[in-house]
Amino acid sequence: MCSAYDHNKCTTVSEILARLGDKWTILIIMQLGESPLRFSELKRAVVGISQRMLTLTLRALERDGIVKRTVYPTVPPRVEYSLTELGISFSQPVKGIGSWVFQNHAEIHAARADFDLRNGEVEDSKLIRIS
Amino acid sequence: MCSAYDHNKCTTVSEILARLGDKWTILIIMQLGESPLRFSELKRAVVGISQRMLTLTLRALERDGIVKRTVYPTVPPRVEYSLTELGISFSQPVKGIGSWVFQNHAEIHAARADFDLRNGEVEDSKLIRIS
DNA sequence: CAGTATCCCGGACGATACTG
DNA sequence: CAGTATCGTCCGGGATACTG
């Protein structure tokens, strides 16, 4: 996919992909792809995320122009997050990966089980060794 | 993309994506997508990767059934890495992301510059403050 | 409600040295 | 050549407390 002369492009791709490929980013984009959400709604939707990480990830996505942040000056404050045009466009290839995983995750898990069988996977038995 | 009832699917996707989205994995897959390579060739191709991370990442990809490891029992040893069928199939949606980034990274960088302008980006000036 | 500020721990990762 | 083993560091990210 990457020949020698466009190595810098490859770096750019993997760089952005690393940013976008962290634990929470995709989940957030998938949620916002369904409908705009407020901060606390997002927190509830993305199970397991801490307040800190939600804030940080949203800031990063906003910075990248993927997510739009809209503040309604009410009391109490109401902040809504939605995908930008760029974000919507980005969610298309993401769905490509998503559906690939849907179709192939069984095969991946099978490959893992197979691999673990052939290679000991005896890590834990080092700890508890009875008799 | 993810409605409430298939939340577990979302988790699976993001889980596997997190594994596949780390700094080196994509670069390696992109290289092997061009042609099979030996360990040292890969190390040279993927600029900046440490021997340790190359080994670890390749093991993980092998475990997931994405990469095939072939040992030729010569002296000195010759080990060749290539994409499996699953790996080739996976590289398709990855190319989808890749070409999206190619087409849109300028816009992302622009968004970042814009964001950084509006929000101070004064971090460093806290350190050096003249007059 | 929607954040920011701090503390702190475990794991990811690089550097280095050694081996079949 | 193609790894494994070990050590040390750094920082991602959770927990908690505080604020406009």
Image: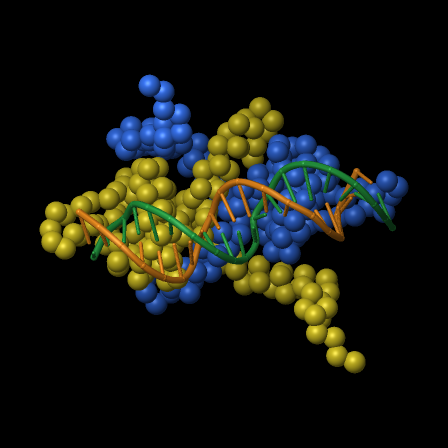
Chain colours: A blue, B yellow, C orange, D green
Of the 4 image quadrants, the one containing the N terminus of chain A is bottom left
Q: Name the one closer to the observer, B17 or A128.
A: A128
Determine the image quadrant of residue A116.
top left
Query: At 40% across and 25% down in the image, what residue appears?
Result: A128
Q: Is residue A2 visible?
A: no
Residue A74, visible in the rendered structure: yes
**Which residue of the protein is positioned furthest toward the front in this rendering?**
A131
- Please say if B99 is above or below A115: below
Q: Position of residue B51 (x, y in %)?
A: 33, 55
Q: Position of residue B11 (x, y in %)?
A: 52, 32
Which image quadrant is residue A81 in? Answer: top right
Where residue B16 appears, as percent x and y from the top left, is 45, 38
Number of disc labels: 0
- Please tell me which residue lies in front, C17 or B36: C17
Which residue is pictured at 68% across the width and 61% down the height? B115
Look at the picture and state if B72 lies above or below A131: below
Q: Is residue A8 left or right of residue B38?
A: right
Residue under the image location 61 percent in, 56 percent down:
A64
Q: State whether residue B109 is above or below residue C1.
A: below
How far from the left and from the top, in percent, is residue A66? 61, 51
Residue extending farthest to the top is A131
Quadrant in which the C terminus of chain A is drawn: top left
Q: Residue furthest bottom?
A: B131
Residue at point 46%, 46% (across, down): B21
